[in-house]
Amino acid sequence: MKPTLLTTSLLSVLSLATASAFAGETLDRIEQNQEIRIGVTGDYMPFSEKLNDGSYVGIEHDLAAVIAEELGVKLTLVPTSWPTLMEDFQNNKYDVGMSGISVTDARKEYAYFSHSYYNYGKTPITRCEDVEKFDSLEKIDQPETTVIINEGGTNAIFARANLKQAKLHVEPTNKYVYDRILDGTVDLMIPDSVEADYRARHHDELCRSMPGFEFTESTIATMMPKDDELKARINAVLAKLEENGQLDKIIDKNMGIKI
């Protein structure tokens, strides 16, 4: 059917409305308020960790400070959690999410992501003495094995999708999962390889049981509302950091921080 003038006009209005929704509303608010609110979980080193004194360390906190400086606004950290990450985002409790957030199709339904600045995959980590017991998914997925997961993140999604026999020990946050491995409460975890490498680096008792192998391929990026102008500004900051070598320095520095 040939579109009428009214139909064409309505389509034009809808197109303009859709475009305006992505045309800088969040960035305008950030600049008007002179503040960018960054949502952080504070439980996922080397990306985001809240220390006992209330301060934060991690790759994302260094990046967030640079982004705020480049935008010329105040940086405010807003606590969130993996189970409530998207709910808090959709309820506008923070502007931008930065805690080592994986880019997933489910999250992309509601958010934009910046250029990725870290690639990783899921890989098992256990006590070094038990490496041979858990050097394949088949060996891991046994009724006598207990795998720890933190609720709300991609670790839980992967474990529930791929482990049919192993017992799952659920923790509400990622804060103490490695303590549970070290004290023998659980056998292992299947986290992101960057986190496994970080923990093995700082705990001689922990080892990747399948070194050099990752079950999945994923990326980490900054999550934000569907605002084209904000995305362009954040991507420009990240590109600058990558070009001048500061991004690698930030990553290396935080991989070396023991908590």
Image (spheres, rainbow, N blue to C red):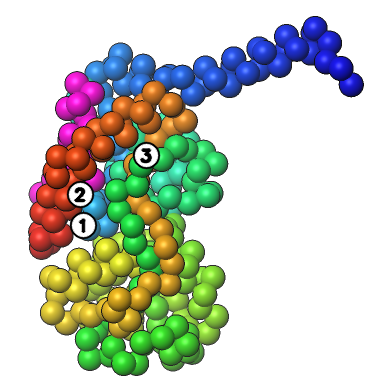
Q: Which residues are magenta?
A: 53-72
> What's the amino acid at mark 3?
Ser
Q: Which residue is mark 2?
A: 59
Q: Which residue is mark 3?
A: 114
Q: Secondary structure at mark 2?
A: helix
Q: Please give the name of the residue rendered at 75% of the width and 12% of the height, measured from the top-left corner.
A: 8
Q: Secondary structure at mark 1?
A: loop
- Does 60 appear in magenta? yes
Residue 68, horizontal then vertical, whole percent: 21, 29
User: Does residue 231 sit above or below 170 in this rendering?
Assistant: above
Q: Please give the name of the residue rendered at 28% of the width and 88% of the height, measured from the top-left corner.
A: 131
Q: Quadrant of the C terminus?
A: bottom left
CB under 8 Å between callouts 2 and 1? Answer: yes
Q: Please give the name of the residue rendered at 44% of the width and 26% of the height, measured from the top-left corner.
A: 227
> What's the amino acid at mark 1?
Pro
Name which quarter of the figure residue 181 lies in.
Answer: bottom left
Q: CA distance from mark 1 to mark 3?
A: 19 Å
Q: CA distance from mark 2 to mark 1?
A: 6 Å
Q: Which residue is mark 1?
A: 46
> What's the amino acid at mark 2?
Ile
Q: Main secondary structure of the magenta part?
A: helix
Marks counted in the figure total 3
Q: Residues within 10 Å of mark 1 (few under 14, many from 20)?
A: many
> Is residue 132 in view from this perspective?
yes
